[in-house]
Each structure stands twice: as C-alpha cells, then as structure tokens.
Amino acid sequence: MPQRSPRGITTSLESISVHPRTPKTPRTGDQRYAPDDVIDEVELNPLTEDAREDDRLREDAWDREPPRPKKISPKDKRSMVLLVILYLIQGFPLGLALGSLPFLLREHLSYSQLAIFSLSSYPYSLKLLWSPIVDSFFFRSFGRRKSWILPMQLIIGTLMLAISFNAEEYINNPADHIYTISAVFTLLVTFSATQDIAVDGWALTLLSEENLAYAATCQTIGLNTGYFASFTVFLALNSQSFADKWHIPRLSLGAYLQFCSVFSYAVTVWLLFIKEDKEAVEEDLNIKTVYKTMWTIVKLRHVQTLCLLHLFAKIGWAATDAASQLKMVEKGLGREDLAVAVLIDFPFQILGGYVAGRWSRGENPLRPWMYAFWPRLLLALVSTLFVFWFPKPPIHLGFFILLIVQTVLSSFAGTIQFGGISAFHTRIADPIVGGTYMTLLATFTNMGGTWPRYFVLKGVDFFSVATCNISNDLTVAAAECVSDHGKQACKEIGGDCVTERDGFYIVSAVCIGLGVISVIFHMIPTARKLQALPMSKWKVYQ
C-alpha cells in the first residue's frame, strides 16, 4: 500500500530564510524607518530585553559584508547533473508541443486551428491542481520523489513510442487529426508536468542550503536543452532541404519520438540505482489536509499579489512569442535558417541561467527579473518590426545576422528573468510544504505565458483580412488564405491570395502597449515591495 505523506517535510532548509532589514528600535532618541513602500508591513510588538538584543544583533549582521560563497561540493555537483537530466526529459515533449509542431502544422492549418493545438500546453500551467497528490502519496521503498518520477518517465516514454508509428500521418493531414494530435500532446504535457512537481520538490532537499539558488539554474539548463533538441535540432534535421544540402537522411517525427522514448527509459533505469535520502514525514496528514494547506498558501496576501503579478507579467511580448517566428517562416524564412538562429542562441540561454543563478543569491533576488523587463519589451517591438520589414527570399546575410542578434538578446533577457524569478521562489518557499509551494508559484509563472497564446493566435486571424483574387473582376474573401494550404487551394483555381490587413501587427501593438503600462504602474513597484518583505510573511506555519 502506498504511504501517505502529510503536508510536507520539516527539514533544515528553514534556515535558508534570510530575514530582511527591519526598523531598528530607537536607542538614542532617533527613529530610523523602513522604506516607504514597505512601512505598512512593519509590526511593532513589545519585546523582552533578550529579544531586542537578538533583533539588534540580527540587524548588525545585515550591515556586515556578506561572506564569500562556498565552493560547490562534489555531492552538490552530482545532484546538479541529476536535476539537469530530469529537467531535460521534461523539455522533450514541451519542445515538440510549443516549438517544432506548430511550425510543421502551420503549413496545413490556420492560426485559429493552431490555437486549438496550443491548448495542449495548458496542463503544464495547471499542475497545481494535482500537486498535493504528488506531495502526499508515495511508496516508502522507492522514495518520496522517485515514486512519481519513475512511473511518469515510463509513461512518457511509452506514449511517445506508441504515437511514433502514426506520426507522419498526423503531420501530413493535420486538419483530419487536429483533435487527436491535441489530445495526445495534452497527455504528454500532463505527465511531464507531474514529473516536474516531483523534481521541484526533490530539488529542495538534493542541494545544500548555500547552493539552493542553483536549482533554478539546473532547471533552466535542463529544460532549455530538451526544448532545444525537440525544437531546433529536430526542426533542422526534419527539413528535406537541410538533409539534401548536407547529404544526410531526413529525420522523421516518428524516429525522433522513438529516440526520446529510449532516452526516457534509460534514465528511468539509471534512477533505480540512485538512492533517495529519506525525508522526515509527518504521519498524521491526509490528502484532504494537503489541499487545505495549499488553500492556506493561496490565502496568504503576499502570495496572492505575487500570483497576480505572474499572470500578467508576460503580456508585453505574448504576441511576438506566439506568432513572430511563424510569421517569418510564412514570409520565407527557412526552417533550417530558424534552426541556425536558435542554435547560436542556445549557449547564451545556458549562460543566462548561470548568470541569473549567481545574480539572485544576494539580498535582491528579483533584481534580474525587474531589470530585464525593458529589454524584453524593446526586443518585442524590434521583433514586430522584423516581421514587417522581412525581405522576400533569398534573405540577405546582413538581415539574417540582425535576426540572430535579436533572437539571442531576447532569449538571454528571458532566461535572466526565468532564473531570477525561480531563485526568488526557491528562497521564499516554505520547506514544510516545499513541493506544493514551489508548484503553486511555478504554475502562475507558466500560466502567465500560456493563457495569452490561444487569444493571440485567434486574434491574428480575427483581425486579418485576406482575399483570393481569381481575376480582375472577381475577388472573394478567403479565410483559408491565412494558411499555406489555403493559399495553395486559391492558387489551384487560378487565384492569388492577398493579405489586405495582417492582424499580427494589431495584436502585437496591443500587447506591447499593455506591457509598458503594466511595467511602469504595477510590475516593478509591486516586485520591489514583495522583495523587501521579511521571510516570515511567506511562511505557512509560523
């Protein structure tokens, strides 16, 4: 019978909480105050003499120069490698669902049909709903986290192997299988999200306290590598022109799915020989209590503020993230050219994760997240202009270099933001309910980038006006002119698709405008207040 864990684990990780500076008790008649934006958070309680002295010593510790970070121990290095590989497996289905498949399907589907497929990524942002189950039920002989990681990886591998045999049929005739494709990848993303819950919780105890911020770096490297393999590498090797140019066999989707399946099986077997450290587990907590604990976390006022912040933090570049590259491919950018751009960008993503991990170790973990807002908004505007000014093929080398620079800068800024906010989550999460707490925050972070995608793709079609000019005297509105398949159909009847108004520019302008307003008046001011809060404000159990 599976053991049930209570609300979580009490570990020594509570000691990683660094208490921010609080107003000093007046000692010489003068009063020093906290910053104006956090003064309403100060509670003045009567203290004993010993408590006041302890508070004074804690404040003095903040005035001293922080100690130099210790070297990473061999145990932590091994743990980091393990985390990177586990996050890598998550990146495989995510790279397919969010990266390469939309490009493959775009040749046959409209943006509205692509919006249906985009729903397959939603489970990754809704994993909070079943995270308490992952935190509560486990087999003690397997280990609390391995009880979920092992079966999820087996299911992911088996599902990818099963769909690999019909993958080419799905890709060549997606309009007939759009709901089947969406359902299959919804399941894949759901199982990947479940594995992510367990890995996030394991990361809190795998790494030592002083290196806990590197958990976000491991996630960045692992997820980006898996995403990169399923998006850039696969997209290039799947291109027939790329295969002909380099005289190599074309990599089919079915073959790639089989490779991912074998890799997932291999890592699962390897995990069988890795011993999971036993965690202290309270025996009196059931699944109902875990959901109550999750509700207790959600009721924390500052958690609500942070979650609301996450939901709208990515609105400024939602349009360019969802559709700019699709638009460039539509205008003539080769898939292999796109693969080269992302290939060059990949090392900078890894560097960004490392920089964010180091930058977030001080007193201001949200600093990289806040600083990267303006570059991301500016680069979203640049990306929109790139689509507008995209030249007719062949693409000039100078324009392609500018495209690569824009891609690298945008991705680097995004990785800095991701690493910074993940480190902040790791710092404030109460280890007593670590997996649920981390998943709650990660859920709203992911949801902020997921929920706009459907509406962006729908909006592109809604605001677009395309006609099929059959002759000088006959022009008909053609909704299918927004897809390559529709354009080909128009061409077969002797017509020519003409886009009179591209809805992408309207949607992008709205998103960037909302992003600028929200950053000035809400995002940065709110982030500064949250960053200045004492760690006790984030605790579920005081």
Image: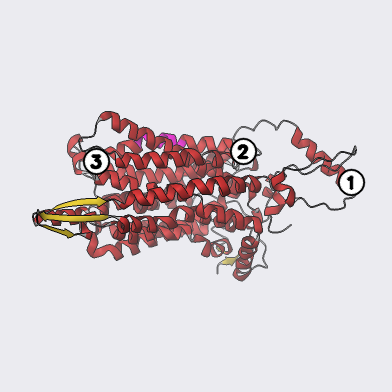
Write down the quadrant of residue 490 in the picture. Answer: bottom left
Q: Secondary structure at mark 2?
A: loop
Task: Look at discs 2 and 3 and give the one toward the viewer.
Answer: 3
Q: Secondary structure at mark 1?
A: helix
Where are the magenta residues, as a range? 343-350
Q: CA distance from mark 1 to mark 2?
A: 31 Å
Around disc 3, counting alpha carbons within 10 Å, would you say few (fewer than 14), some (14 to 19), or many (20 or more)?
some
Q: CA distance from mark 3 to mark 1?
A: 70 Å
The residue located at (30%, 57%) in the rendering is: 461
Disc sitting over residue 361 in the figure: 2
The residue located at (44%, 61%) in the rendering is: 123
Q: Which residue is mark 3?
A: 334
In the rendered image, is residue 6 in sight? Answer: no
* Residue 207 falls left or right of residue 536: left
Magenta stretch contains residue 369: no
Label 1 is placed on what type of residue?
Answer: Asp
- From the viewer's side, name the closer residue of 390 and 435: 390
Q: Secondary structure at mark 3?
A: loop
- From the viewer's side, name the closer residue of 123 and 302: 302
The residue located at (81%, 40%) in the rendering is: 32
**Residue 374 screen position, x and y as percent:** 50, 39
Q: Which residue is mark 1?
A: 50
